[in-house]
Image (cartoon, coloured by chain):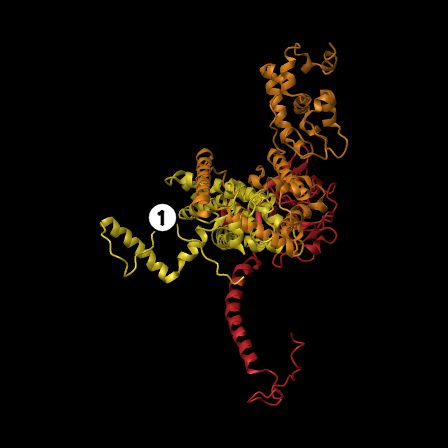
Amino acid sequence: MSDRRPAQSKYTIDRGIPGAFEGETVTRRRLMVFAANATAGVAIGGVALAATGFAVGQPFVEVDTGWHDVGPLDEIPDDTYVPRVITLDPKTGQVGKSTAYLRKRNGTVDKEPADKWNQVIAISSRCMHMGCPARYVQAAKNFVCPCHGGVYDFRGEVAAGPPVRPLDRFYTRVVDGRVQVGKRFSVNSQIERFSPRPPGQPLDGIGQYLFPSRPTQRKIPGT
Amino acid sequence: MAKLKLLPSLPVGLRAPTRPGDPVEKKGPIGHAQDAGIHAVDWVDERTSLSGTMRWVMFRPIPKGTNWFYTLGTATMVAFINQVITGIVLGMYYEPSATRAYESMKYINNEVFLGEFVHGMHRWGSTVMVVLIFLHMARTFFFGAYKYPRELNWVIGVVLLVLTMLMSVTGYLLPFDQRAYWASVVAMNIAGNAPIVGPFTPDIALGGPDVTTLTLSRFYLIHMMIIPGALIGLIGAHLYLVIKLGTTAPPWVRADKVSAGLKEHQE
Amino acid sequence: MNQREKEEYLREYAVLKAQGKPFFPYIIVKDGVMMIVVIGTIMLLSLLLGGELTAKADATTTTYAPRPEWYYFWAFELLRVVKPPYLVGLATVGIPTISILLLILLPFYDRNPERHPLRRPIATTTGIFLIGAMFFLSYLGAEAGAPSRIELGPPPAIQEADQATQTKWDLGRKLVAQSSCGGCHKIGENGNDGPGPPLTEIGDRLKEGAIRETLINPTAPMPSFADLGADQIDKMAFFLSSLKSGGEDEGASATGAEGGGAESEGGSAPSKAP
């Protein structure tokens, strides 16, 4: 189509448009079309941006889960796990809680370096395949998920089935002989700490880059 | 092809309204009541011209050989209408809050008149709707009804299927019992498995990293406003295309030899 | 479909339409009947099955076995059968996304003008195969029991035995279920198929003593259950050794053969000779 039209100068003054200024390239018609589109765009965009921000932004506001007392250190064994329920969000009843399996760090099985956050090992009960509630079974010393066949060994590492990484853990600290459970973190197959991720997201290899963590949920720096 | 396409004519059972100048006939009270109805319809029609559309919809010719398989689309829509009606009345008693949702469902089941019946109709209506959608889709597939000129209607149909599956995902959480909760946890982790964007989709859907009150109100809203709105709009488009393009005949039905009269009419 | 085929179809369709009937009232009657059938079915299902609720949502549970709504059983089973962790993404987003895309684009890659299902063998076969696959996966998903439970009934030999034996068998069944054997072994419809061998018919292959020995001194990666104590291992071994092939059917015929088939292992093979 454009081929058929004779070549035009880009300056309005060359095209003989009345009232054109020297060096002007935008015709009044184009200016009005642009202005009409721009006003509509600003009006709709303002509402859309505000609504989207309102709907999408809140999940990225940081939630501080704090430290939760789970009883004296003496009650925590080192050859088996005891379940403890921690309340992450007191306003939502039973779904604002989480189950952690606790045991003392045991040098004969735990190979990752000891520091002040892992005197007590706290393992999350969420299966790292699709988030079903896994259960610790003392008879076989493993964690079994009831959904898709995930089985974890005593340290929470994948023993069988489709889970993509070991069970998540919680930071723990001991204050005045009492154990406190803090933030959740994820681990790769070497039990290195990573910022927490939802289940189903691998952390080995390029997994940690394919599945970035939430900007508001981070592991404790330097751990 | 500048021939004017005539609408199908009114069937003899329906009377045209009397107009000024028509011969006046003696009428009893029933006749006057009939006239009142006709005039009311006529008043609306004069301002909307709906009667042409109605004639186009109701008296369109359906190809010969149409059988019971062709009622599956209507059946799906009936199941959807059932979901809309029962869903609206369930919403009158339901509270989308993590601490109250389960109790309000218990209340509906145990205290409200016909409560468990209507709850059951909504729950099993979803099952029936999914079954009917799949049957309707299988019929369309095996009859080759997605082919020219109905490709766009197939695409709309698949989008309707996806939206229906999303309806069942979001609706499943609402009773907030164990089954609902863990199914939603798994569903969201499945959605979170897509690389790069994955970690953010469940956050936005759940309103945070976990299934909480925020999730419940979000799912409630998605379940009763956003997706139903999209569904109703797309069902409208789907039906419009069905009426515009016409329903297919079963692929094994062939047209009879075109009679001389019909041929003349066509030319 | 080229222009000629399109026009041919439209011409044929116009004739079919001219030979058909108007929607109202001929077709709408069928639709009306179908409406009544659908609403009737929904009401009947609601009356029969109601809207029962399970326990209130609880994020702290460690005993609940989540299961999806039945029309997602195929997806559930897909997640179960895709075992290697690096393929999990395929089962969760890969296959569903590809399926939806293939479904949406169907009219654009299926350019065959033919509409009769028997004259489109590839499309029809693929359709039937996919429906069959969905049914098969859904069936497997529906059957899959939780690994922390065993839903097998006692075999005939145990049913006929005295009360003490039955109690011992049942205690063994519960112990096996609670000891996470189902995590690695399939027992009946419960448990995961692998990495361990299925135990549904383990009694055919191992005697009670051998099972007891395996529970105490297993080959890696199976963990040792020695900590449970001799008494409990005894019950588990007794239960596992009772799991034999045949099940109820063979048991019923075995009653005629002096109950020998269920008791001694070699008994069934020679009895076929006469």
Residue under the image location 62 percent in, 17 percent down:
C156
Residue A98 visible at all? no
Q: Residue C143, relative to residue A59: is it above or below? A: above
Chain in yellow colour: B
| Label 1: few (<14), some (14–19) or many (≥20) C-alpha neighbours in 10 Å | few
The kind of residue on which mark 1 rests is Gly
Chain letter for the residue marked with disc 1 in the picture: B
Q: Residue A53, relative to residue C61: is it above or below? A: below
The residue most toward the front is B260
The residue most toward the right is C219
Q: Residue C256, relative to residue B254: is it above or below? A: above
Residue A221 versus residue B150: which sits nearer the camera? Answer: B150
- Percent across and percent down for residue C161 are 61, 14
Secondary structure under badge 1? loop
- Percent across and percent down for residue A206 are 73, 54
Residue under the image location 28 percent in, 53 percent down:
B35
Split into 4 quadrants, where in the image is the N terminus of chain B? Answer: bottom right
Please tell me the colour of chain C: orange
Q: Name the residue under label 1.
A: B13
Residue C164 versus residue C79: which sits nearer the camera? Answer: C79
Split into 4 quadrants, where in the image is the C terminus of chain B? Answer: bottom right
Residue C101 versus residue C223: which sits nearer the camera? Answer: C101
Chain in red colour: A
- Percent across and percent down for residue B162 are 57, 49
Quarter where residue A103 is shown? top right
